[in-house]
Amino acid sequence: MNAIAMSVLLFCSFSMFTGTMADRLWVLRAGAPDNRRGNFAARLRSLLVLGFGQQRLLLERGAGLMHVAIFVGFIVVFTRTCTLVGRGFDANFHLPLLGGGLGLAYAAVKDTFEAVVLLALGWGIWRRLVIRPRRLHLNAEGVLILVWIASLMVTDVLADAALFTLDPANPESGYAWLSTACAGLFAGGTAASTTAWLHFWFWSHILLLMAFLNFLPFGKHFHVLTSLPAVYLRRLTPSGALEKIEFEGRETFGVGRLEDFSWRRILDMYTCTECGRCNDMCPADLTGKPLHPREIIINERDHARAMEAHLVNVGKLKAQGRQAEAAAAIEAFGRPALIGQVNDEEAIWACTTCGWCASSCPVLIDHIPNIVDQRRHLVMMEAKVPAALQNALRGLENNSNPWNVSSAAREDWIGDLPVPRMRDKGSAAYLLFVGCAGSFDSRNQDVMRALVKLLDRAGVDYAVLGNEEGCCGDPARRVGHEYLFQMQAPINIETFKRYNVRKVVTACPHCFNSIANEYPDFGLEGVEVIHHSQLLTELVNEGRLKPKAGADLNVTYHDSCYLGRHNGQYDAPRAVLGAVPGLSLTEMPRNRREGFCCGAGGGRMFMEEHLGTRINHNRIEEAAATGAAEVCSACPFCLTMLGDAIKETDRSDSLRARDIAEVLLERID
Ligand code: SF4
Ligand code: SF4
């Protein structure tokens, strides 16, 4: 077309783009280090399945599929765009392999995808302007980008249409069906006017593309460029595991300002698409708390943008090894407080760490570590702890339980039951890790008594640690008191080692998660950890527990976030219930991966819930609407929250909450 014009455009566009991207990279460099190297195979799998394969969006109907269509169409059309750039220099340019039959097939595929993308974009614009789903912000950028992408498609189709009008013998004209169909638009024009149209649509396409490339880094559509690297560099540890802090040689802990975040978390901020999926079923968001996970990420991103020049400077200083100057620049820079002004402090405390947000995010943004790191700063650097939590932390420190009951009373729940202690037995096939709720909370003591009776009936070789057991550390770690967690976990690990424990079974998903996913960072090796629902399923399947027939019972099951979403155990508790003759299970609408939190995780069990409506009430409404007589659970925290909600909403006559072990034992006895 015009080699000089194309050269100038390419030079200007790529110079600007490179400058912007370099600044973004300096901003990332301003963050703390985070090693995301290694495990190439797992990273590649994520990239293929979750990045290119768009797995999370494919699981959705509607908007998810629309996005997949646009994503695939974009990739297909990108090949065409490269060809058009080449044609700026040589009118007959083809990419390698696309000059012959493959190129003709590509022309047909490309036109098909352009048609699909245009339909998807039309639906996307309608959805934003007319349907307006709750989770979407109506903003001009969203609509502008959809129109922009549509314009890229339209200009390409019309450039080809003009070309085919001028040259009906062009081999692609029979294949690029959409452009061929549009060629009629130019019928009747002179060769000169059609040539002018060809140039107009061609250069419009190129200009729109160059402008699009340079606009992307400034809006939420930066994710077009960052999402694939973000997926590749995802965290590969279990979603329920928090990162260990190395206290040695450090003076600050947690995140109190943006530069304290690792570069990977800053990449998260740039990658957010603002789709709002994370808000969709966030229990805090849905019950009127000031926490909206999307806004946490967006607020931080806007904060990063507002201080970009400073961050670029810090990034450059760090890259040059001038750490002291970087630290001084960070110290001297005036900015709004991350916690309090950028993020609402109440929002940081409102998170139940239920994991809905991260599990629903199409670009794998990791909200929980972001939030917990801010709690770590509040608790360990500023000694700012919600009043109601102070007693729990004192209890954890002094008595190794958040109920702050004397640690000497840890095995009182056993009473005169013949429960073996490790100190007497020396070893056992299973260590039954009771947990603080099973040890000190009266309702959950009933569950433990039911469980040990089942284990006895099945002839399981087990023992408990009794007063030698300490809190698993989950509440301390989730509320940000990492120091306290690191005092507790090693004590339990040493005790496990002393008794050569090889298998741990627990009825508490929080203990399960900490021991299985977090203790390995502190030296626990070669220990299999299972949840009581898994062991009970095994015992029923082996015929060691044989539930008898009884009255019909309709129940519903509430998924614990730390058993289900964080650890993928959805079937075992349902299998235990399914083994009870006459029991029918009616699922709540929000179940399994979409299970709704009870409100107790993340240390919320020990805090006041004074904002909005109560999360456990929201859940119990849903349980009651199934018409079930019982809501079953497999977590002591969930059982407490559901039981409280039943009482507080005056449903004690029509609904009761029980653990799956209690339901099973009733039919064994
Ligand atoms: S973990 Fe749960 S409560 Fe916390 S922000 Fe995410 S969805 Fe909301
Ligand atoms: S954090 Fe993820 S789920 Fe939430 S708005 Fe951003 S991209 Fe969407």
Image (spheres, rainbow, N blue to C red):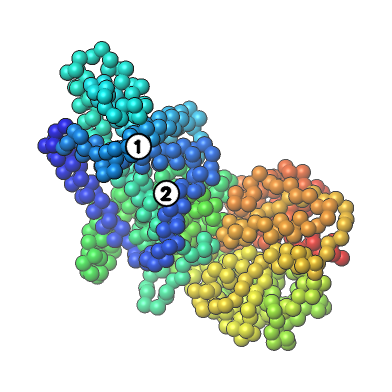
Q: Left or right of 629: which side holds 18?
A: left
Looking at this view, name the residue that lies furthest to the top. Answer: 188
519, 89: nearer the viewer: 89
- Three-letter amino acid code at disc 1? Tyr
The residue sitting at 27% across, 22% down in the picture is 168
Q: Which mark is residue 666?
A: none
Secondary structure at badge 1 equals: helix
Residue 212 position in % (x across, y down): 28, 38
Q: Quadrant of the N terminus?
A: top left
Q: Residues within 10 Å of mark 2 (few under 14, many from 20)?
A: some
Residue 479 screen position, x and y as percent: 52, 64
The residue pinned by badge 1 equals 106
Of 97 and 115, nearer the camera is: 97
| Residue 52 - label | 2
Q: Quadrant of residue 177?
A: top left
Residue at the location (33% across, 48% down)?
A: 225
Residue 34 vs residue 457: left or right? left
